[in-house]
Amino acid sequence: MDGVPCLRVSQCHAQEFRKCLQSRGALDLSLCLLKESDGTVLLPILPSCLSQLDLQSLRSTVASDNTCEIVWSQSPLQSKKERGKASGSKLEKILQELLESHGERWTEELKGDIPRSFQKHGDLVLLRDGCFSLPLWKKMDQQLWGAVAKGLGAKRLAKMSRISRDGFRSPVVTMLLGEHSWVRHVDNGIQYEFDVTKCMFSAGNITEKLRVAGFDCRGETVVDLYAGIGYFTLPCLVHARASHVHACEWNPDAIEALQKNLEANGVSDRCTIHRGDNRQLQLCDIADRVNLGLIPSSEDGWPVACRLLKRTTGGILHIHQNVTSPLPNTAAIPAINDATQRASGKKADREAWEAWANDTADRISSLLKDISGAWWKTNIQHIEHVKSYAPHVHHVVLDLECRPS
Ligand SMILES: C[S@@+](CC[C@H](N)C(=O)[O-])C[C@H]1O[C@@H](n2cnc3c(N)ncnc32)[C@H](O)[C@@H]1O
Ligand SMILES: *[C@@H]1O[C@H](CO)[C@@H](O)[C@H](O)[C@H]1NC(C)=O
Ligand SMILES: *[C@@H]1O[C@H](CO)[C@@H](O)[C@H](O)[C@H]1NC(C)=O
Ligand SMILES: *[C@@H]1O[C@H](CO)[C@@H](O)[C@H](O)[C@H]1NC(C)=O
């Protein structure tokens, strides 16, 4: 598929991201940046650096900002040599021909309504919200999607739209062209297959997956209480070499993907899937490690996780939570500069995570005492920052060691 990989970031942080990419040698200096109509900027990345790029660390160096994702852009990213010369993309040419064959005229308005960047999942292109919104496109019917796919070098097309549900504008993916909506990702040597219309693949989870892959779980029995399509279960089996993983999941679509993924990676013999609500799980006293990967909070799973830990030796809980830190009172210190403000914000964030971890450790200790009738010691091994949702809302993971004393 043709196109240039780019980092899509918000305009206000574009210069910082550009410097960061450049210092890592990942910026394609022969190409120009591209401003999108929605106030984001595309920074061209050298394709050879793509797999090494750590989005999470980029995000945390620059700003806790939502927009920082890899997209693919078609040719309009002009090379610096050709700057100023008008150059239409292959997609543009194909669409222009299609319109003209329907007796329509090619206008700037139409040109502005075609996507300049998109996500790629193998042979499937996922278009963003806000393109092909003009009524004229409807006239082209199914021919339009065939032409778009051809123009982008894809076989299948899907589109993301934001739909209001429970007060949140959650993304919904619909297929425009293609027989099926399953896609495959290879990430750190693990194959993930999933249905783009039912599960979202977010690059923000990559660091957590890499961290899990680095664990040594040889000889361990592990329980993944919220397995999803296997983002914890798979690296735990493939790289961390757990003896056995019990994977709990209640969504049939996720279970279907999880089963495919276990087979594709040749580890299904070391995994048992438990369908249904994990709070009803009948297992107890078996686990060396329990993963609780649910946000905003996994609290509902704490009692079952405590029951699962081995009574005589205990184990480790990986507790995910969405932690909100208090906003710093900047009005009181008006002359404060940006860097100082950012540093004090980071300090406040860390304190909030630590306070939450301390409170969680206490509550887990008392749950363990209630369940086993004996005293337990808890130890905060590590607090991992996974992702920022807003300047003060962070997804963190607490590694809590729990031992009977
Ligand atoms: C956020 S996903 C977890 C993905 C994975 N752990 C990760 O970190 O990427 C949470 C999954 O938990 C499942 N889930 C939520 N509550 C559950 C429950 N009570 N019992 C079983 N599964 C549950 C959801 O269906 C969803 O697939
Ligand atoms: C990434 O992790 C978070 C928390 O575990 C989850 O809410 C989100 O859905 C995950 N992304 C995918 C693609 O599963
Ligand atoms: C994080 O938690 C806050 C408050 O608990 C909530 O408003 C927000 O929607 C949560 N975000 C996510 C992505 O779960
Ligand atoms: C967390 O607990 C430790 C040990 O008891 C203590 O030193 C630290 O100040 C606590 N942190 C917060 C933010 O409450």
Image (cartoon, helix red, strand yellow):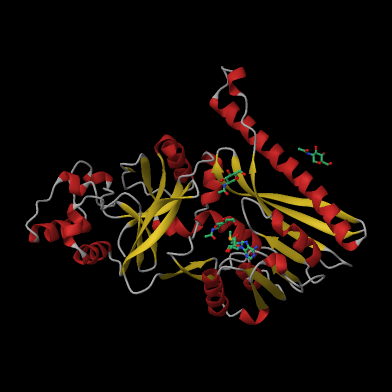
In front here: 237 or 180? 180
At a point 80% along the width and 57% down the height, the residue shown is 401
Question: Image point 22% across, 58% down: which residue?
Answer: 91
The answer to whether 145 appears left or right of 202 in the picture is left
The answer to whether residue 216 is visible is no
Name the outermost residue toward the left: 103
| Nearest the eye: 107 or 250 | 250
**Quarter where residue 258 is shown:** bottom right
Q: How many marks?
A: 0
Counting from the top left corner in percent of width and height, residue 371 is at 86, 61
In this image, 270 relative to 138: left or right? right
**Left or right: 245, with 187 as reference point:** right
Q: Position of residue 52 (x, y in %)?
A: 50, 57
* Residue 368, x across and y down, in percent: 85, 58
Q: For the N terminus, which image quadrant?
A: bottom left
- Ligand 1 found in image quarter: bottom right
From the top left corner, tell me how far across and down residue 219 is, in percent. Answer: 77, 74
Query: Which residue corresponds to the image point at 52% horizontal and 39% vertical from the top-left?
Result: 62
